[in-house]
Amino acid sequence: MNGLESIASAPMWAGFIAFVLLMLALDLFVFGGNKAHKVSVKEAAIWSLVWVSMAMIFNGGLWWYLNGTVGAEVANQKALEFFSGYLIEKALSVDNVFVFLLIFSAFQVPIQYQRRVLIYGVLGAIVMRAVMILAGAWVVSEFSWVLYLFGAFLLITGVRMLVAADSEPDVANNPVLRFARRHLRVADGDHGEKFMVVKGGMRYVTPLFLVLILIEVTDLIFAVDSIPAIFAITTDPFIVFTSNLFAILGLRALYFLLVDVADRFHLLKFGLAMVLVFIGTKMLIMPWYHVPVEASLIVVAVLIASSCLASVFIAKKEDK
């Protein structure tokens, strides 16, 4: 494979990036995303529906455009790749939600300040993932054997998740947090929604800023899993980029939608671990058997749905 192969033209890239910037600007300056605000379940559900609908409209528009320019076969394939990549990223984002909840709980961050932390967390995640996706696409295009390394990494990660599914990360002893506390002046106490304060002419970071650092690091760690997983579906950088970003844009709404019921889906981590095991195995057996995108989509959907149903069933059984 030589060079980055993509169905997207330069105007398509520019148009999508402009759309993302517009939505972020609206969120920050029109809908008050950078202000303290307690998000209700109803509001989170509406925004989740908006983001999912936008992703599906985009996919439909992409299919319509490709159908008219390169034919139905390519249009169907790319639309299916986008939907599969979006579903995988959306599913793996749920694991982010569990960790975000632990971080906010450990720092006792009031619900009204969590919204502001997450919007800046999303901004950082978009930049990091854009760099990682474009770099990963280039590496894969130049060294196709890297896909097998991705597969082995995902398989090992999935197995480790299965083994440690019941354990929770120790937020207080996180090495990134310890490093930040050693090298930054931290103003302990409640400082509202501020990330920085000035005391005695010196600038201090607040505990909320430390939370933001942990949120960014958490997303970086999860991106190392999720981005290679989408490369198992497609190596087209435009499809990887757009499906990933649509899932990230809806991450904050997903958090507030699930924050009160996250403990009800305690078996979902096992399902997500099995998704990584399946995708890793799929990448490793590519020289001998190519798993169709349709089959991958079905397997991922079944694993996620069955783990959610099992969580609800077992929870109800334990409550009796």
Image (cartoon, rainbow, N blue to C red):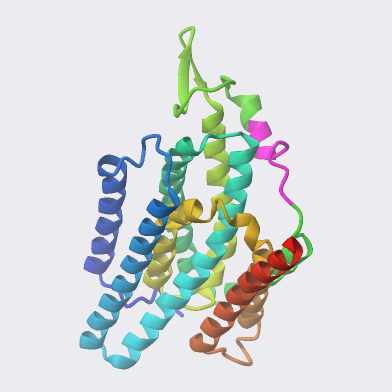
Is 224 or 137 nearer to us in this picture? 224
Q: How many marks?
A: 0
Which residue range is magenta in the image? 168-179
**Quadrant hosting residue 295:** bottom right
Residue lying farthest to the front in this orientation? 320
Residue 140 placed where, x, y %? 51, 72
Q: Which quadrant is home to the C terminus?
A: bottom right
Towards the viewer: 95 or 66: 95
Q: Nearer the viewer, residue 147 or 39?
A: 39
Residue found 54% across the figure and 67% down from its top: 91
- Is 32 colored magenta in this rendering? no
Q: Is residue 221 left or right of residue 73?
A: right
The residue drawn where x is 30% and y is 71% is 58
64 is higher (above) or lower (below) than 164: below
Q: Nearer the viewer, residue 317 or 131?
A: 317
Q: Residue 151's x, y, as percent?
A: 64, 74
Q: Is residue 142 visible?
A: no
- In the picture, measured across the screen, residue 27 lies left or right of residue 313, that is left
Residue 82 in view, yes or no? yes
Vertical position of residue 137 compared to residue 5: above or below:
above
